[in-house]
Image (cartoon, helix red, strand yellow):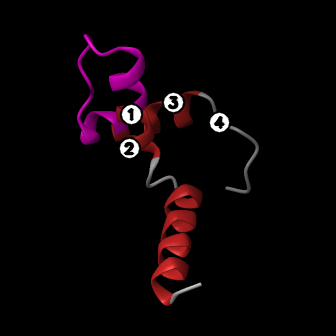
Amino acid sequence: MTVREVFTGVRWYLREVSGESAYDHYVEHRRREHPDEPVMTRRAFERWRQDEREARPQARCC
């Protein structure tokens, strides 16, 4: 395994765990499943995501 492959794997993992890749997954899904419908901007998506978190709080420490 090369250093580049390790770096790529670590980068992928951190993006998945942190939620950074959520918008990329959203865009991919919308284009695949709903190609005729508009796609939210990243800013609108993050606002929607935050509103969803606040509307449906889960058990968390703080």
Q: Is residue 57 left or right of residue 21?
A: right
Q: Is residue 6 or residue 18 the one in the foreground?
A: 6
Where residue 44 appears, as percent x and y from the top left, is 28, 33
In space, the residues marked 2 and 1 are separated at their CA atoms by: 6 Å
Assess disc 3: are there few (<14), some (14-19) or many (≥20) residues with their C-alpha within 10 Å of its C-alpha.
few
> Which residue is disc 3 drawn over?
52
Q: Which residues are magenta?
A: 28-45
Q: Amino acid at mark 4?
A: Pro
- Mark nearest the camera among 1 and 3 is 1
- Mark nearest the camera among 1 and 4 is 1
Element assignment for label 2:
helix
In space, the residues marked 1 and 4 are separated at their CA atoms by: 26 Å
User: Residue shown at 55%/56% (left/top)?
Assistant: 16
> Which residue is disc 1 drawn over?
28
Q: Amino acid at mark 3?
A: Glu
Q: Amino acid at mark 2?
A: Asp
In space, the residues marked 2 and 4 are separated at their CA atoms by: 24 Å
Where residue 3 appears, as percent x and y from the top left, is 50, 89
Q: Amino acid at mark 1?
A: Glu
Assess disc 4: are there few (<14), some (14-19) or many (≥20) residues with their C-alpha within 10 Å of its C-alpha.
few
Q: Are marks 2 and 4 in contact (CB under 8 Å)?
A: no
